[in-house]
Amino acid sequence: MAEAEKEKPEAPEVVTIMAPVVKRPKIAWSDDLSHDSEEDREKERLAQLERELEQTREQKPIYDPEELEKLVDYVVRMTTIYDLRPEDWTPATRQRIEDWFLEPKSLILSIYFKGDKLKASFDIPLSPVYDLTYFIRPPDFVFKAETFHDDIVFGTFRDSIEANVINMMEYVYAPYFFAITAWPDSVKSEFCTHIHTFLAKLTDMYYKMLGLTVLYIPREGQHLSFEQASADRELVKRLEGVVVYWTHQIKSCLEDTAFVASQKELLCPSDEYDFWIYRHENLNALLHQLKNPAVKHITKILVTTHSTFIHQFQCLCEDIVQKVKEATSNIEYLQVIKQPCAVLECVVDPDEISKHIPHIINLFRFIWMESPTYNSEVRITNLFKALSNQIIILCRNYIKLDDLFDGNTIKALGEFSKCIDCCKKYREIYDVMAEAHNEENPNSWVLDTGSIFNYIDSFIQRCFDMLDVCNCMIIFGRINEFENMNKPYFGGARGDQFEAKCEKIERMFFAALLDVKAVGNTILDVQAPSWYDDILAFRTVIKDIEIIIENLVDTVFESVNHVEEAVVALYSLNNYSKRKNLKRVFKRKTSEMWAMFSEEVQESKKDMVSTRSHYPADMPSYAGRASVLKMRKNRLVYLKNIMTDASAWLLPCSSSEDVIMHVNRLMGAIDVAIRELWIAWTHNLDEKCGAGLNKTLMRKSAEFPGLLECNIDVNILELCHEAAHWENLMMDIPLHAFQVYSKSSTINYVYESVLAVVKGYNKILDSLSEEERLLFKPLITACEKKVQPGITKLTWTSTMSDAYIADCVMQIGELQDFLTTYKNCNVNLVKIMEKICDTPFVEFDIYNVFDIKALRAKIRKMESTAMDSVLDMYKLIVIYLVIVYEGFEAYITQVNSINCI
């Protein structure tokens, strides 16, 4: 103890400035009534107190400016906080430090960063700070520059509470407790044991978080020789407790033979190498601690006392040496995979990963075969698991989920497919190499493949899950960055209902997609099991959507009546048919559509047989029937083209080829039938069919005397009509018929013109009575002269000028106009005559009585009015007669001669 007292440092010299102590005088209180009054005595007492306070008032220290500057510089240099720079010391901060030296009542000075600004305060900051340097002095202590470093108490608090507590306990409080002699031995022993246990566990926990194994070395007993310490049984027990904890720490360190990853971390081969580097350094650090004189001193004490715990501790110390050698060997062999794995970590495209895998697996095999300490199946399995993790990390980095949820579904499909292929190739390469080694040397490659590929299989499954999500985004969400996919549109009365149902499907899907997007951080995390619940919820929604679509398809097809509507309905819903679970429904509807097409083909076949002799009334016999067949064929060709074009997006149907075959056969049969009709027509043609063109254009009617008839050969018109339709049907026309048909345009023009003339002439004659015909005979004769060339001279082959037809039409038109005027005038004349007959000259009411004079005046007035009316009508009669006369004026002589006869 004497040695300890000698080694005890001297107490620092404390310099204070204190006011001279003046003892407070006692004031005698007297009951003598002759003394001053009580009020005077109170004033005297207060004045005395004022004088005492004035004498004891604080006096601030006075420093020389140079000394004060030097003290501030000491504080600046002793402040050790993170990222402290010279420019951080502002004049305001330095002034604050000067104020602290000038205020002896301020016991603490704290220097810290508040934001980006350095602060100095006389108290502990109320808000959290990263670190803080403190300076402490006794009350009313005045520092001097010469002794500042000996007098000041300072330190730095970090953000680590554990480190601050350890330092405070180990270097400040624990030595005081260990040196206490006033406590009973049992109490002190128990208390010091708890201190050792607390510091040992806290030190272990703090440095374990930093990845280190640090032994707590107690300072108790270090100043005693091992003989003296051995004699203190309580001290030995406490040291045994510390050594037991050391044993536990060392055993844990030695058993830590594999890197322990966090829940969100995947270990790679480079992590395995880094682990052994860390293990090597940690074990060497542990050896270095064991060489500490204090540790050796404690060990010697326990050896001297024949402690039962020291033997296990010493054995573990020897094991550390062996483990260091093991770590060194493992580092040497793992060094060979460092560079290849670093190259693998730089790979971006999953297609390139498979090129590096065989070389790395060969290196793993080399380590397995050659390493004396790393050749266990467990460690090699862990190495392969690390390689699997590395591949998963590379694939996960390659996949851009943000791009997927932004709408790049096709890109994402490619990314997921690449990653799946990459993982499968890795498994194939592993199996091939393992099989090759086992064939060469049976059972030489036996590893836990389930453990190796557990995460790989899980990652592949998640990629398949996301492939399903991508396909659903394309099918149900119409999200495709390369194609603008339109919304389904439906016709008919219920089209709006069907479209509303499709919009509901999209809303359901996007709600489920948002849920998937919300858990995007766990999608590719093979260590996150919550994804299985998330994808199950998504698939449940998709299942509900599929049921809605199945019902929608059935409802839409209830209103489908023919093939075209079926094709349109399937096209509107085609995007849903890409869903695997919906293919069954769409295949059924596709089969129904082909069945409808087949039924229509059969109906066309039956109609062709039952209506073989039918043809439109405005068409010729042979070409009419052929045209009907051609229309049926065109209908079949149209439907066939629709179905053929739709086959590009329709689901395959087993009956489609048979239906197309029947269609082709029916179309071939129609072509044959058309050909047969054409042959029958050509056989019925007269080789002298053109002889009818030599007839005159018109002839006198034998059945209706006086009338004209068009003298056209009906066979010529039928031939031209048939030939025109056969030409439209792309069939050849025989030469002798073609010679006639080539003139069909002229013939038809002449025929129409002659018909106009004949109809006009006959209409005039039909509208005249026998007497009127005699009256109009000169005018009719004039028309006959115009028409006469067509009756006697002009034929259908003659070159007839348009002037002839124009003159005929004009002559007949003029006659028809005059005839119409004549008829109208006659009708009007009859009406006027009737009106004259009905016009009374005198009209009286039998019940009225008149004066004779008034009666005469009224009669004259009535006669005058009636006469005026009759004269007006007479004038109209004259006008109508003049109009009729003007029509006959050119032929008045002939008319007079006819009337005389």
Image (tube, rainbow, N blue to C red):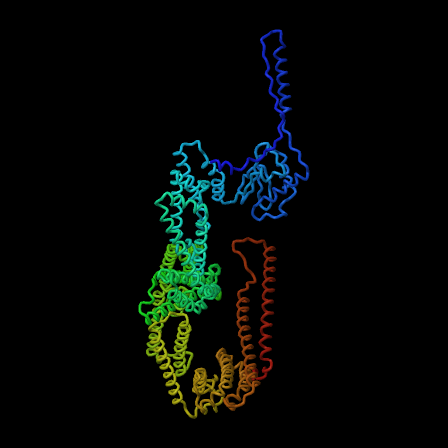
Quarter of the image where one finds residue 476: bottom left
User: In the figure, 374 relative to 307: above or below?
Assistant: below
Horizontal arrangement in the rendering, residue 73 relative to residue 737 (left or right): right
Viewer-proximal residue, 258 or 748?
Answer: 258
Residue 526 picture quarter:
bottom left
x, y percentage for residue 58?
63, 28
The residue at the point 54 percent across, 66 percent down is: 835
User: Hey, which quadrant is residue 190 in on the image?
Assistant: top left
For the question of whether residue 504 can be seen, the reply is: no
Q: Identify the residue at the far left of this view.
A: 442
Question: Residue 828: in sight, yes or no?
Answer: yes
Which residue occupies the foreground of this view, 159 or 538? 159
Q: Which is more toward the observer, 474 or 758?
A: 474
| Residue depicted at x 49% and y 64% | 346
Query: Percent x, y for residue 298?
Result: 42, 44
State the image coordinates of residue 37 (x, y, percent, origin top left): 62, 10
Q: Residue furthest right?
A: 65
Number of numbered callouts drawn: 0
528 shown above or below 239: below
Residue closest to the eye, 21 or 723: 21
